[in-house]
Image (cartoon, helix red, strand yellow):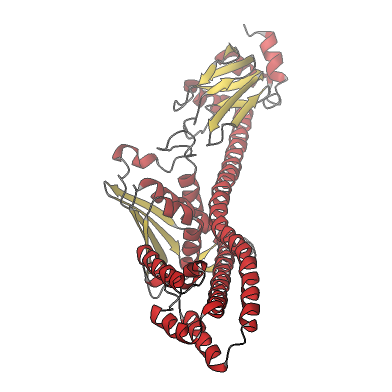
Amino acid sequence: MTDPDLLARLAAHRTLGFASAGEHEWLAKHGTMARLAVGDVLTRKGEIADAMTIVFSGRIVIRVDRGAGSHKLFEWQGGDVGGFLPFSRRAVPPSDAVAEEVTELLLIPVGDLPELIRECPAVTAATVWAMLDRARQFTSGDHRDEKLLSLGRLAAGLAHELNNPASAAVRSAKVLLGSLEATESAGMQLGAARLSGEQLAAVHAVRDLCRSRSVRAESTAVARADREDALRDWLSGHGASDACAAPLAETAVTLEALDALATGVQGEALDAALRWISAGCEVRALASDIETAASRIYDLVGAIKGFTFMDRAPTPQPLDIRRGIRDTLTMLGAKTRAKSADVSLQFAEVLPCALAVGAELNQVWMNLIDNALDAIGEGGHVVITAGAEPGRVVVRITDDGPGIPADIRERIFEPFFTTKGVGKGTGLGLDIVRRVVHQHEGEIEVESRPGHTEFRVRLPAAR
């Protein structure tokens, strides 16, 4: 005999209450009531549920750690239906399903679901809608969370990339103020020396030699240190300030040129002339450093705009994938340098455009290249090639890491599957890569062995 209280609870159930009394009786007859205390596990990570779950009260939650602490992925409360549903694809949960409140539920064994489909069409329809809602929740949720995590990684890398040129610009600007004051002071003293035209010509000859080129990029640090010591000795020997040695060491001035200057200009006039020359050299060097830093920041901002397509509508359009890959490598520059990685690009001379949404496609390159950098060791190699096949653009991303073990190779595109440690990987990157590629009517393949892992992405070429 069916429990009237159970039938009443089924009739009041938010998801299944609209079904007929006959279907409620079928559920009551085939189901088993269960009560979970706080902390009890309903289904464990990696194990397929063995029953459909009709929740009457309480709360069951699946939480995962995506690198920023525990995060709620799914939740079932009173009035929900979960567990193994009719027409389910037998997906395994990414973590334990745990009762966070005292929970009462009705369990329908998986073996009875074929009969449920025949005998309870209204309940079956309701569970299908519940499954679709769950899929939509999962899809939107994992996309959002992975994008937020990617944004966090991107922001961290970008902050590191911008910090160096910004700090260099600020540092140079502060020193520049002192150098300008030194230039003015030395210029006034040089003017007060009332040098003849021949003497001024000798001073300008040394200054022009300093301005002609820099030796900074043409010599080693040791060679520049030796050069600075030699200049300091010369300055001390001629009664001039040895503070001029460091700025002059970065220029093409020679001891012979200084000797020629010293033959016509001596004493305080020589000291003033050399301080004016060295201060001018330092000002130009600092201005050049500021220009280089500002150009680097400008290039980074351009790479960000190109990577995010912030000024483009999110619609498929012909894209040169080479630019997207280069922008992605710019975003990953800090990680590349941290591993001393050798990243090489090999692009075909003639490469058709791909028909794609740029921001989404760059997310593909970001995940694949980031994974390749994670896989390699210190000083490892990553090779990125792009070519064409009939009607297709083909991108290959290869690394010389340890490879993907054969027993897990088929699972790498599963949601939440990761070989990285806790907090280091979400297990969503490759799943999103697969979805984006398929949404673009493309294909993705992987080939792996120790020392060689290659991901191949084929995308339709724009006509």
Image coords of residue 391 (percent x, y): 42, 68
Classify 450 as above or below 248. above
Residue 75 seen = yes
Farthest-out residue, bottom: 197
Q: Residue at x 64, y 29 (%)?
A: 122
Q: In the visual, does 25 lie left or right of 51?
A: right
Classify 53 as above or below 334. above
Q: Which of 358 and 304 is in front in this view?
A: 304
Q: In which quarter of the image is residue 58?
A: top right
Image coords of residue 314 (percent x, y): 62, 60
Placement of the N terminus among the 4 image quadrants: top right
Q: Which residue is drawn at 34% across and 38% down?
A: 408
Farthest-out residue, top: 1
Q: Nearer the viewer, residue 23 or 212?
A: 212
Image coords of residue 456 (percent x, y): 37, 56
Q: Which residue is drawn at 53% across and 89% down?
A: 199
Q: Nearer the viewer, residue 121 or 271?
A: 271
Q: In the visual, does 195 lie left or right of 340?
A: right
Total number of numbered discs in the rendering:
0
Residue 352 seen = no
Q: Residue at x 68, y 27 (%)?
A: 15
Image coords of residue 55 (percent x, y): 63, 20
Q: Nearer the viewer, residue 421 or 428?
A: 421
